[in-house]
Image: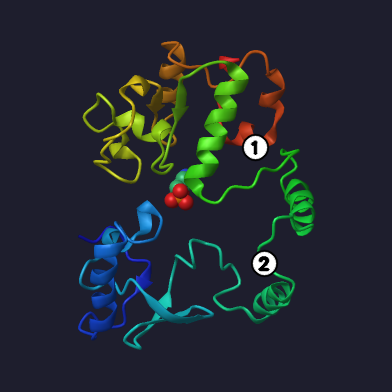
Amino acid sequence: MTKFKGLALKRTTMNITKSLDMQNRAKSRIPGMTQLLSKRPDMFAPGVWPGYFSKAKGVEVWDLDGNRYIDMSISGIGANVLGYADPDVDAAVAEAIKNGTSCSLNCPEEVELADLLCEIHPWAEKVRYARTGGESMAIAVRIARAYTGKDKIAFCGYHGWHDWYLSANLGTENALGEHLISGLNPAGVPKGLTGTAIPFRYNHIEELKAIAEKKKTNPMNPKTPELITCPFLKGTFLGVKWAV
Ligand SMILES: Cc1ncc(COP(=O)(O)O)c(C=O)c1O
């Protein structure tokens, strides 16, 4: 099943035996293999997708069998904006490694980065670091619930595997079906979360309005009118100023 192809395959008849063997070995030891849920090897083209790489440089990627690919879109989930193994980035990383990369104390660079992030995103005043997209969203949802005192979340798009998100599929046929990955099974998600995450489709502002009108949720807390003057939210929730 091909969801989408991020790497342009040079030939579909190429030998990828070692890469496939490694995927089979991984599957028996690492359930689902290591990757984003949306981009793990099973989501691409099983039997054709190489899954593992031996080397990556610039826009090129080599699999375990030595086949070369051009990465047309994924680029390490967007992390390698300068291309793989960029010489300047690699030199800075190598320099940092000499001073130890993991420590009980924090590295001062995190403060420098937080300042920079706030500078380039003027709508933000503070920074909280997370390790994954799903974790970032779980943090955002927790903060929203803590601040508003409300449980229900209106959202659109794909946001990972955490309980708050998968709960949208509890008691529904497939509420998340329109949000990138269809058929996500909420097994293990507490039933008590049923009805707390309500999806609306991207660019379907009327669906968000309907959710607010039913008072299932309120996209912005009346206690925080300053939110609507925030350019980021204005851009994202264009048209819901009425809800405040
Ligand atoms: C908007 C958004 N939220 C959450 C996630 C989940 O990220 P992760 O798999 O890193 O937890 C993704 C990943 O594609 C995403 O695009």
- Crowding at dot 1, Cα within 10 Å, few <14 / some 14-19 / many 20+, comes out as some
Q: Looking at the picture, does residue 183 appear above or below residue 204?
A: below
Quarter of the N terminus within the rendering:
bottom left
Q: Earlier in the sequence, mark 2 or mark 1?
A: 2
Q: Looking at the picture, does residue 157 appear above or below residue 204?
A: below
Quarter of the C terminus within the rendering:
top right
Tag 1 secondary structure:
helix
x%, y% of residue 75?
49, 68
x%, y% of residue 213?
45, 12
Q: Residue at x 35, y 88 (%)?
A: 66
Q: Residue at x 24, y 75 (%)?
A: 20
Horizontally, residue 128 falls left or right of residue 36, namely: right
The residue that disc 2 covers is: 101
The residue that disc 1 covers is: 232
Q: Nearer the viewer, residue 223 or 188?
A: 188
C-alpha span from label 2 to label 1:
34 Å
Tag 2 secondary structure:
loop
Residue 18: image quadrant is bottom left
Q: Nearer the viewer, residue 244 or 56?
A: 56
Marks 2 & 1, CB-CB < 8 Å contact: no
Horizontally, residue 12 falls left or right of residue 36, namely: left
Q: Looking at the picture, does residue 160 appear above or below residue 37?
A: above
x%, y% of residue 143?
59, 29
